[in-house]
Image (cartoon, grey):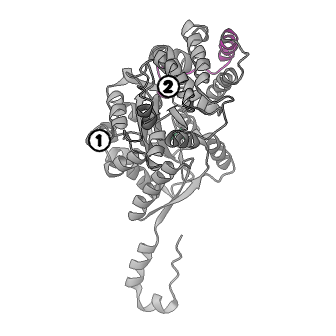
């Protein structure tokens, strides 16, 4: 922070001037812990930083690089335990209520009230950011997980059509491989496998069954034929991936798609932001589709910032940050860079590209289309998520494990996991 120590001479003879210049120099600041490290994520952070600076609020960067926030949550926990919490943090989904219930989050009720968030936000988002009738998070954007990206140049050069079903997807595999192209880019990282699997599960079932598995964790759902089908489909998809599947960062996979080494990628639409940042225009270098069988649904992952409450000394800066992220001026630009859609229901769809417009259409159609992302913390508590993700990953990595064996392992394991208290969505419980 800038020092403001006037000389004795200035103190005596220029008190007014001094008052003005000191106020101007003393920008408020907030340290924000987050995991946005890729090219587009950094562009999004830079945009936030610049806008806030124009309003005399300094964003002190607390970057902990880690796809989907694996490392960032650990660092946040240890900093809170050490009494050294940042003033704000990127915290998503169920984790928001877990921290709020421990009394660690500052309420931003007055910001929500003055910004008319209840009226302006999508009801799903509004619901998500409240714990025990207090608003405890400022929402930035809504990502869609069930997105299939494809390289347009490859498809047009080989005269191929993007897949509308898994059968069509399977038919593409040999054609792309013969051309020396990896059909589907994929990483063996646990969260990336889980991101693919949740989409596959929805594609072979429906939102109610998806929630039986990931929200309600019903042991019988894991023994269901639809769960078996999803595991089989996951294994079949491996035929379209490099063997062995490499342990790559998601931004490296985006680059493979942009460079034409890979033809397709199934991932949250932050990949769109990244492809744009790599110079690939939407519907020029690449396009996006809903994953086969999921066009009517939007697996959502809402990015939110929470304010950590040590005392009230930073409250005005924290409230200013919360107010900014939800402002229409920032929402539109930020989400364009990030690849997500705005959290405001009256956002201007005319300014969106085809991927965002499509995601917007489905998400805004209402609750029946909205499915909480398991891998991105929207569906269940952190312990259950980790345990289930590990089992899915084990099956993915071990081709010797039978589908039946994986089903039994998971059905047995979920019996021991914490139960969500009530409701359809895990985030809705307790609220
Ligand atoms: C976050 C996104 C982020 C992605 C990759 C997701 O969990 O919601 O904002 O871009 O992880 O790190």
- The disc placed on residue 429 is 2
Secondary structure under tag 2 reads: loop
| Residue at disc 2, CB closer than 8 Å to ligand 1 | no
Give how far across and how far down residue 196 sits, in percent: 55, 27
**Is residue 429 within the magenta segment?**
yes
Dot 1 crowding, Cα within 10 Å, few <14, some 14–19, many 20+: some
Q: Is residue 337 left or right of residue 364?
A: right
- The disc placed on residue 347 is 1
Q: Nearer the viewer, residue 358 or 165?
A: 165
Q: Is residue 256 left or right of residue 243?
A: left
Give the residue displayed 45% in from the left and 30% down from the top. 158
Give how far across and how far down residue 57 sits, in percent: 44, 62
Q: Nearer the viewer, residue 195 or 430?
A: 195
Q: Is residue 118 left or right of residue 95?
A: left
Quarter where residue 197 is shown: top right
Give the residues drawn in magenta, as a range.
Answer: 404-431
Give the residue displayed 48% in from the left and 23% down from the top. 425
| Residue at disc 1, CB closer than 8 Å to ligand 1 | no
Q: Is residue 6 above or below residue 354?
A: below
Determine the CA span between mark 2 and mark 1.
28 Å
């Amino acid at each position: 922070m800038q020092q403001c120590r006037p000389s004795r001479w200035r103190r005596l003879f220029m008190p007014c001037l001094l008052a003005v210049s000191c106020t101007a120099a003393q920008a408020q600041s907030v340290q924000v812990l987050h995991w946005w490290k890729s090219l587009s994520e950094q562009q999004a952070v830079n945009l936030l930083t610049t806008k806030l600076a124009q309003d005399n609020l300094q964003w002190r960067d607390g970057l902990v690089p880690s796809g989907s926030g694996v490392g960032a949550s650990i660092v946040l926990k240890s900093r809170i335990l050490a009494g050294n919490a940042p003033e704000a943090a990127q915290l998503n989904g169920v984790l928001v209520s877990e921290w709020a219930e421990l009394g660690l989050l500052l309420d931003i009720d007055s910001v929500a009230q003055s910004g008319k968030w209840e009226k302006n936000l999508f009801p799903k988002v509004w619901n998500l950011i409240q714990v025990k009738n207090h608003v405890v998070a400022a929402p930035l954007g809504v990502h869609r997980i069930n997105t299939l990206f494809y390289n347009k140049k490859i498809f047009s050069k080989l005269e191929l059509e993007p897949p509308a079903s898994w059968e069509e997807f399977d038919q593409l595999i040999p054609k792309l491989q013969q051309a020396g192209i990896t059909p589907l880019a994929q990483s063996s990282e646990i969260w990336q496998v889980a991101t693919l699997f949740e989409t596959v599960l929805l594609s072979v079932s429906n939102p109610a069954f998806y929630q039986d598995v990931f929200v309600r964790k019903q042991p019988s759902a894991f023994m269901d034929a639809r769960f078996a089908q999803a595991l089989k489909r996951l294994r079949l998809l491996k035929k379209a991936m490099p063997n062995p599947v490499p342990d790559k960062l998601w931004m490296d996979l985006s680059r493979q798609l942009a460079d034409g080494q890979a033809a397709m990628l199934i991932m949250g639409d932050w990949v769109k932001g990244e492809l744009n940042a790599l110079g690939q225009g939407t519907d020029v270098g690449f396009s996006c589709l809903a994953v086969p069988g999921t066009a009517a649904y939007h697996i959502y992952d809402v990015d939110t910032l929470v304010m950590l409450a040590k005392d009230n000394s930073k409250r005005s800066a924290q409230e200013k940050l919360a107010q900014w992220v939800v402002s229409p001026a920032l929402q539109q630009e930020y989400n364009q860079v990030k690849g997500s859609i705005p959290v405001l229901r009256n956002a201007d769809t005319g300014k969106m590209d085809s991927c965002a417009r499509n995601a917007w259409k489905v998400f805004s159609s209402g609750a029946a289309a909205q499915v909480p992302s398991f891998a991105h913390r929207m569906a269940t508590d952190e312990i259950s998520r980790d345990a289930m993700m590990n089992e899915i990953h084990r099956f993915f990595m071990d081709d010797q494990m039978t589908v039946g064996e994986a089903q039994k392992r998971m059905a047995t394991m979920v019996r021991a996991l914490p139960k969500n208290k009530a409701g359809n969505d895990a985030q809705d419980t307790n609220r």
